[in-house]
Image: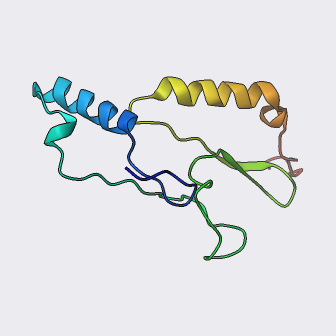
Amino acid sequence: MRPQTADAPSVDASDVSYVLDAVNWSLGLSVTPGDLVSGWAGLRPLLAGEGGPDTPTADLSRKAHLSTSPAGLPVGLQIAAKPFDEETIYAAAHAFESATEWHRRRPPLAEVAPPV
């Protein structure tokens, strides 16, 4: 296996172990690392880099991102975790709320005429 860099991820032993443990448990098999022919690792950025399409995007799919409106209000927060790992997502959301005041902000409401 080759060393991992930010823009060239590789499959490491912990990745192989994680997948094989899940496959063997769910399918009742005994697949070992020696049974594998190849592996693949890649990035799937869910955001565009600020410098355009040539911007390295390795960190974009690994970090939480908060988008704000022109008024400075949050419009989206991306948190990702492994499948079925909701506990991590909830912990990250709780940490974000604990560290910020975003959840207390509200948009200004326009005054409307009472119904006739």
Residue at far front of view: 2
- The residue drawn where x is 79% and y is 57% is 69
State which quadrant residue 70 falls in. Answer: bottom right
Across and down, in percent, residue 45 comes to 53, 59
Number of numbered discs overlaid on the protein picture: 0
Across and down, in percent, residue 71 comes to 87, 56
- The residue drawn where x is 67% and y is 76% is 52
- The residue drawn where x is 38% and y is 47% is 11
Residue closer to the observer: 90 or 53 = 53
Colouring chosen for the image of the structure: rainbow
State which quadrant residue 33 falls in. Answer: top left
Relative to 50, say whether 27 is above or below.
above
Relative to 104, say whether 51 is above or below.
below
Across and down, in percent, residue 68 comes to 78, 54
State left or right for residue 87 relative to residue 100.
left
- The residue drawn where x is 39% and y is 42% is 12
State left or right for residue 74 relative to residue 24.
right
Relative to 100, say whether 62 is above or below.
below
State left or right for residue 23 relative to residue 91.
left
State which quadrant residue 55 falls in. Answer: bottom right
Across and down, in percent, residue 5 comes to 55, 54
Residue closer to the observer: 74 or 19 = 19
